Amino acid sequence: MKIGVCIKQVPDTEARLRPSASGQWIDEEEIPFAINEGDEYAIEEAISIAEQTGGEVVVVTVGPERAREALRKALAVGAHRAVHLADEAYAGGDCWATARALAAVANRESFDLILTGSQSADVGFGTTGTLLASMLGWPHAWLVVGLEVADGSAKVTREMEAGKNELLQIGLPAVVEVQAGINKPRYASLKGIMQAKRKEVAELSPADLELDPSQVGAAGSRLEFLSVSVPPKGEGAQILEGDTAEVATQLVDKLRTEARVL
C-alpha cells in the first residue's frame, strides 16, 4: 500500500505575528515554523498503517525552501520519501490551486490512500482535502478520529456534534482528513534523524506534473487576500455601570435595539 501524506509548514502557534509590509500576509522574517499540528497526526497514522501492511509513506508539501525542514522531520519519524513542490510557480496559491498541484502528484504516484490534517493552523479553511478528493474523484472523510484499513476499504470514525460519532466504510483509494488526537505522534530518534539525510526528497516543477504554471500558485487561485491586519483595540467597547440588575437591563436593551439579536 502506498500512502501519501499532505503536510504544511505553518508559523509556530506561539510566534508573535505581525502584518507584512504589503499588508496582504504576515511578515515571515525571523519567526519559527513547524509542521501543522493536524498533519503530524496524519504522518503518524500513515506510518502506523504502513508498518501493519508493509506499505510506503510519501510526504508531500507545497512551500518555499524552508518547508524542506518539515519534510525532513517527517522522514526522520519514519516516512520513506518526500515530494517538495518548491517551484516559484506554486507560491501564493489558495486551496484550489494547492489541491490541483497535490492531485497531480497523487496521479503521478498512484497512491492507495491520502491522509492529511483536518485544517491548517494559519488560514484554517479546511477545504484543501475536500477539493483534492473532488479533483481525483475519490471518496473522502473529514474530522476522522478513528481509522482502520483492510481489504481495499477504510473504516472511519468521524467526530460529529453533541459528542456523537459517525462510522463509515469507504472504498480505496480515498482522501482522509484526520483530527488531532487520533493517535500519539512519535518522536524522531537519533537513528531516524541520520537516516532522513539519505532519504529522497524529489522536487517537481509544474512541467514535471504536466501542469501549466497558470493552473497553480497565485495565477491559478480563485481566492485573493486583500489585506491582513491586527484587530483594532478598544473600538466599540462599552462599559455598563450600575448594580447587577441595572447592568442586565441595559445589556438586554442594547442587544435588542442596537445589536438587534433579540
Image (cartoon, helix red, strand yellow):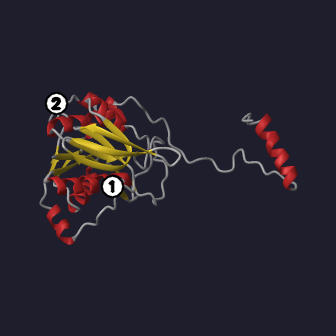
Other residues around mark 2 within 10 Å, as few (<14) / some (14–19) / many (≥20):
few
**Is residue 252 found left or right of 229 in the rendered image?**
right
Q: Nearer the viewer, residue 26 or 56?
A: 56
Quarter holding the C terminus is: top right
| Residue 88 at x, y percent in the picture | 26, 40
Q: Nearer the viewer, residue 106 or 157?
A: 157
Kind of residue at disc 2: Glu
| Residue 106: quarter of image | top left
Read off the residue under disc 1. Answer: 41
Q: Which mark is nearer the camera, 2 or 1? A: 1
Q: Secondary structure at mark 1?
A: helix
| Residue 114 at x, y percent in the picture | 25, 43
* Residue at 30% over, 44% down: 155
Q: Secondary structure at mark 2?
A: loop
* Residue at 16% over, 30% down: 210
Read off the residue under disc 2. Answer: 210
| Residue 137 at x, y percent in the picture | 26, 29
Q: Height in image: 13 above or below 210?
A: below
* Residue at 31% over, 61% down: 185
| Residue 215: quarter of image | top left
**Is residue 249 found left or right of 80 in the rendered image?**
right
| Residue 136: quarter of image | top left
Residue 260 has which mark? none
Q: Nearer the viewer, residue 208 or 180?
A: 180
